[in-house]
Amino acid sequence: MTQRRWTKLLVLALSAALFTPLTAGQAGASVPLDELTATTTQLAQGLQRPVGITAPDDGTDRLFILEKAGDVRVYDPDGGLAPDPLLDIRDKVDTSGNERGLLGIAPAPDFARSQVLYLAYTALPDGADTLARYSLADDSLEVLLSQDHSENSNHNAGQLAFGSDGDLYWSIGDGGGADDAPNNAQNLNTLLGKILRIDVSRTCGDLPYCVPEDNPFVGVANARPEIWVYGVRNPWRFSFDEADGSLWIGDVGQGSQEEVDHLTPDQGGANLGWSCREGSEAHLPGRCADGTEFTEPVFTYRTSTQGCSVIGGYVYHGEEFGDLAEGTYLASDYCSSTAWAIRQNADGTYTTGTLGTLPTQVTAFGQGADGELYLVNDLPGQLHKVTFEQVSASR
Ligand SMILES: [Ca+2]
């Protein structure tokens, strides 16, 4: 997070503390969800299958946009979409199948100085899910970690984000196909169907990264120590709430339920259920022993009737709509474009609702350095800004 974002949150927290009790996720004023609507304004077009957005913390207000084939484009609020890519690794990326490609990007916490980016992609020749470090200074690419994913081309997940702990988190899908046939998501000996947490600021022995000592499966037999949470199917997009460091995950369902999970920073080791459970329901209960503990989603909706694939978003902490939407988590669905909203209440329960239907399809959300929310649609290839409005409660 940028210095100015920290300062703004501190001011928000202080002013809220003076007048009202401060609650997690609701640091500022906001109107009831049934009086709130979300829409979008187009900023740029002509992108080639954009699938992700990030913002470097370097004072430039730029957005970096992933194109599935393997390049990163730059949107500048003053100059618009730059014609030349920031980087191009198309000769490394396996784009066979709809879900393979360059899928994730995270600027290093010291990006302004180091000019280092982390990238997640499916690599040639066989589609291995791959995490690599890219240096803009010399256009070098160093592979840090990869996971075989050759059996199926779908369910690669691919989100990258740094937590407030400075560690890098990476989501990998269950290996694809239907019903997670090999039971990967519940198997701690594979990285498939997991969200990982590693320290990329150091090296340890032969590894080009380190495993944080407090990762939940360090020292556990037959478990990969990089695992942070398990039992996920295809967590295409996750994000951190910069106000409390909590993790919001949109895990794409198979045919029954789409789900959003919300984990505090002390919930490492959580089993999110797949494929024993799908959303809030039993799916293949025989996959898990009696008494297995699951962490239930905080929000679900029906896959077939209310959409097809959840697109995880962000908790809004921008200034422009702070009096309307501060502390509101916004997500969508790839097919229905519903604007799903979730707020955590002071007692730990959640209030959920819709903020209407977005005027465009959503492939991924992003959060600018200014805290405002943006989205891309892969077809036809546009960048939009999310805006909020207060409406009458009769909607
Ligand atoms: Ca689940």
Image (tube, rainbow, N blue to C red):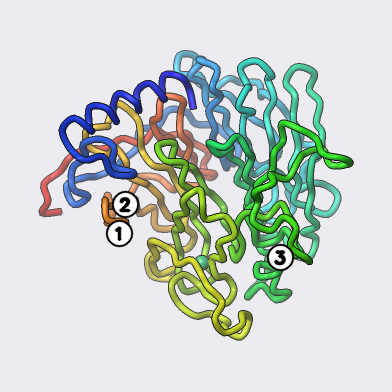
Mark yes or no: residue 98 visible.
Answer: no
Q: Nearer the viewer, residue 233 or 102?
A: 233
Measuring from the top left, give residue 182's x and y in whole percent. 73, 74
Q: Nearer the viewer, residue 268 or 336?
A: 268
Whole-number angstrom distance, CA of label 3 to CA of label 2: 30 Å
Instruction: Report if the CB atoms under discs 2 and 1 are less than 8 Å apart.
Output: yes
Measuring from the top left, give residue 304's x and y in whole percent. 43, 71
Q: Which residue is mark 2?
A: 344
Instruction: Report if the CB atoms under discs 3 and 2 are less than 8 Å apart.
Output: no
Q: Which residue is mark 1?
A: 349
Q: Amino acid at mark 1?
A: Thr
Circle number at residue 284: none
Q: Amino acid at mark 2?
A: Gln
Mark 2 is surrounded, within 10 Å at the Cα level, by few (under 14), some (14 to 19) or many (20 or more) other residues, namely some
Q: Which residue is mark 3?
A: 188
Label located before the other in sequence (2 or 1):
2
Measuring from the top left, give residue 200's x and y in whole percent. 72, 35
- State the SS at label 1: loop
Whole-number angstrom distance, CA of label 2 to CA of label 1: 6 Å
Measuring from the top left, give residue 382's x and y in whole percent. 49, 36
Label located before the other in sequence (3 or 1):
3
Residue at 49%, 60% in the rendered image: 309
